[in-house]
Image (cartoon, coloured by chain):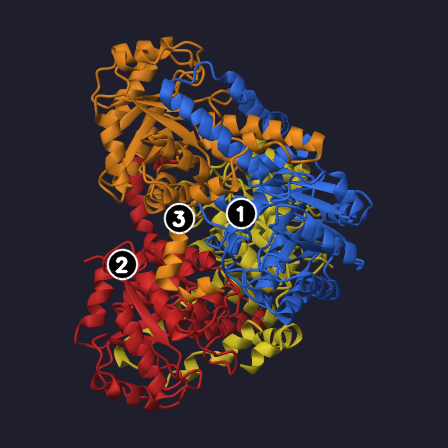
Chain colours: A orange, B blue, C yellow, D red
Amino acid sequence: MTKAQQLKHLLNNDEVTYALEAHHAASALIVEKTGFKMIWASGLTLSAALGHRDCNELSWTNLCDQFEYMADATNIPILVDGDTGFGNFNNVRMLVRKLGKCGVAGVCLEDKIFPKTNSFLPYNQSLSSIEEFVGKIQAAKDSQTTPDFCVVARTEAFISGQGLEEALKRAYAYQEAGADAILVHSKKSTIEEIESFCKCWNGSAPLVIVPTKYASTPSDTYQKLGISVVLWANHLFRASLIAMRDIAGRIFREQSVHGIDSQIASLNDIFELVDENELKRAEQKYFPLNLNV
Amino acid sequence: MTKAQQLKHLLNNDEVTYALEAHHAASALIVEKTGFKMIWASGLTLSAALGHRDCNELSWTNLCDQFEYMADATNIPILVDGDTGFGNFNNVRMLVRKLGKCGVAGVCLEDKIFPKTNSFLPYNQSLSSIEEFVGKIQAAKDSQTTPDFCVVARTEAFISGQGLEEALKRAYAYQEAGADAILVHSKKSTIEEIESFCKCWNGSAPLVIVPTKYASTPSDTYQKLGISVVLWANHLFRASLIAMRDIAGRIFREQSVHGIDSQIASLNDIFELVDENELKRAEQKYFPLNLNV
Amino acid sequence: MTKAQQLKHLLNNDEVTYALEAHHAASALIVEKTGFKMIWASGLTLSAALGHRDCNELSWTNLCDQFEYMADATNIPILVDGDTGFGNFNNVRMLVRKLGKCGVAGVCLEDKIFPKTNSFLPYNQSLSSIEEFVGKIQAAKDSQTTPDFCVVARTEAFISGQGLEEALKRAYAYQEAGADAILVHSKKSTIEEIESFCKCWNGSAPLVIVPTKYASTPSDTYQKLGISVVLWANHLFRASLIAMRDIAGRIFREQSVHGIDSQIASLNDIFELVDENELKRAEQKYFPLNLNV
Amino acid sequence: MTKAQQLKHLLNNDEVTYALEAHHAASALIVEKTGFKMIWASGLTLSAALGHRDCNELSWTNLCDQFEYMADATNIPILVDGDTGFGNFNNVRMLVRKLGKCGVAGVCLEDKIFPKTNSFLPYNQSLSSIEEFVGKIQAAKDSQTTPDFCVVARTEAFISGQGLEEALKRAYAYQEAGADAILVHSKKSTIEEIESFCKCWNGSAPLVIVPTKYASTPSDTYQKLGISVVLWANHLFRASLIAMRDIAGRIFREQSVHGIDSQIASLNDIFELVDENELKRAEQKYFPLNLNV
């Protein structure tokens, strides 16, 4: 199965699939090696890793460069955060064509206005018109270069303060436009908005959710609500931040790295992460003389 | 002081400066916020973060893209790992010109052969001729676009199995060629090679070391030996790896992110890291209407 | 004088400066070698050279990559076509900071909506609000990293079918916001719109025009109207297109390149264009042994 | 047929295929529209277009960015000039994987030393060992991501002053290593070296030549010698240079673009080149409201 086929399968089978965030190839490799079947390439964490805010400060091709490193390094599908598509329907077309070349399996597009604002910030959350966003979904689907590339339509209706009715209306329109799945987002600290949506939804498109704020929801709830994919959307980056902050503080205070070995991976862990042995085998195959030096 | 001036000052003052590794803008920000005065942009960890090995699999411009993100995000000088200069003297010129534009304060060049092999791997460690490397140092110095940009010449004489005499001979030649500092590298588990070098060295160029393998050395030793800069060369990446691996394992097993808050930074920590407040102030200044939506 | 100082001087002295379009480093070099004092990096021709339409199909960083090649190769100032700034005021800030690093001397920003449409196409020409565009100009000026970087505000009032009053109102507002010059654009086949504007204008900001459609205007008219800079905005690309088309046709028909020498530059012309001799001198300086092989 | 299949077919059919140089997407489009079946992406002209010399001043990923624009814009196969592979066998693997994503149909690798020197310059022409280059060919073939991607092995034996025997010995070794074709290069002003090679060659790999210096050879000679592909390796760039120089000189002298219309393409030619009509149709399909403005 291609990566796109894998993603399509995960969206459409009966089980809940959990996807974990990655923000660079190393974190993507960790997601894969841990056993997850799917990677979420988060706009928030990828931007922050590069020192930028989640409001399209980075160009879409800057982001694609990073997606490509992540896809090159891993064997499971990556769903990338495509924000609003970085402009109009034509920018969406450029993006989808490029993402296919980068080796990602699908893109999530959201119905806000370019440049976007992170959903957890309390301003600039106005929505695109349904007509414009439907055109983007259609353009994305028509531009994909592999048959199973997945376009996930994300509605920010709840985020922007609209109610259930608007969220459903948009979700049906996006499904009709060809979306392979619907992501419905909420910043409530409980799952109530999502629950109300799921109970009303009788579309055929699978549902994707992002329980960042309502993280305390018991995980059997997702299965009961018929959720297809749950995105743990930013947790590896958050874990790395605290670990780096702690170790940096300790090294600064102690002016030494002695005694911290239990808190850090070994050099060999790095060499294994990037499969140094494969290179040595290749060198033996393609240029053995080089190793003699 | 410009960043290059800061770096030159740190190399030449009487105190030992400790520099900590960063592999992306977020880790560079942590180095700065912790209180360090200098950032080391490691080729090993930057490559691994992008899923690649430390043997010039990434192009030099790929690396510069990442250096630029790191420099844009921070206010303290970054010394970047320039490997062998990615080719001959002319490639060194291209590199140094580009690094100036990226906003980094200096580059470290090493006297091995392109494509390089990581110093801690037990093969492919042969050295460049002194003549060729001297030409690279001169070319680097002649190409810098700001007067205080620092070129650190790194000798791998010990790494390649040569002795003290060769290391000293090379260090003097590189100083003569214009190097702003000498980095002498060792993979011994004690500081003995470095110690022997320092005791013999009576050049004027400041000395830089990388105590990755001889990490147990008491830190007052560095001052005694007259070391100028100590690079903790890969420790933030190693801390992040283990933290991400642990949290990924826990989330995978528990199918939940509930209860892990003490192990991860908050969303607000991310927003603070990238100074979300500055954007809000800017929006009030440049387009207040936008915030009303 | 820095390139930015040169540009500021050209904008503000009493003579008409003619700037010629370039779309890659080679054409930029030709502009300089011919004797022009200023290069116009056109969005239309640069996009077309890369196979794309003038509607922001290319990302802003893709464009910056090309601007940087052009600036690296030349010694006269480049004014780049920054379209609408590729988003809102914050995208403008990103752009201006990057352009400074690329070595360009100034940017022209226009008061249309992202993604833009080429001014000579008969649709999608609606304007940004004055308030929003004023914020962009202020953000651009506040973000420049050298004191003489020039921000040229381009009003598309005539292009969008608005009249003289709107054009003047906008121009005064943009000057007030800090614009270093005003570009007033027209697609009329005579200079009448521009003439009416110039006769009414009594701002202090210098004026820039683009006589693509009203090319038959006698050149002494520009001086009389008090124009500061005239952009020949796309002519090198258009000359290259027809020449390449002709020679391609001939080679295709004749299945030979024999006898076409008078229509093509020599290999030596290419070597001179990129100053091959400088490299040979550098090689003699930095690595003479290499030349012996 | 995929582009790689087209290229394989052109290499292996009985006719001589003529390929014309392109250095950006616009020139590639002209090659295609003229009727040629194949595009040569020249390292010399692509570097010169970006203001650089043909000695690997540009990084391999810089080049790939440009190859990708060219491939995105066209429907016929592009054979790209891969120089020496930008390092060792492992760099070749990186290159070939990336080229597949860029959409190019094949790569030509030459048996010189990185960084390379242009073949028409009278120095730095020493050859790689056969063993090392054979390893590169094998690595390239093993790394291709589509079955028909073509690896053309170029021997510079004649260029480096070696004779026929060395050229043949290398060509057979490269064919044995898996090369899809052999390019044999000569800087003689007559075809004699190539002729001697062709008459002795009884390998199965098709032959490719570059008659830049021996351009006066009658074209029926190529068929008689059993040549498969003839590369007109730099002629569009050379035609564009002279045309741009001429028109720039005229505009500079006349301070006007009046009366030059017969020497330049029209704006509509540009809009047609990039298929502006397709965008208008797409807009009607995906967002008709936009056109009303």
For discs 3 and 2, the disc positioned in front in the rendered view: 2
Q: Which residue is mark 3?
A: C121
Choose between D139 and A81: the one closer to the eye.
Answer: D139
- Where's residue D89, x and y in %? 40, 62
Residue A79 seen in the current view? yes
Q: Is residue C266 left or right of residue B77?
A: left
- Where's residue A98, x and y in %? 36, 45
Label 1's element?
helix
Q: Name the kind of residue labelled 2 in the image.
A: Asn
Q: Which residue is mark 2?
A: D75
Q: Are marks 1 and 3 on the same chain?
A: no
- Where's residue A2, x and y in %? 25, 41
Choose between C79 and A35: the one closer to the eye.
Answer: A35
The CA span between labels 3 and 2 is 26 Å
Q: Name the kind of residue labelled 1 in the image.
A: Leu
Q: Which residue is mark 1?
A: B44
Q: Tag on residue D154?
A: none
Q: Are marks 1 and 2 in contact (CB under 8 Å)?
A: no
D140 lies above or below A19: below
- Where's residue D161, x and y in %? 44, 86
Image quadrant in which you'd find residue C137? top right
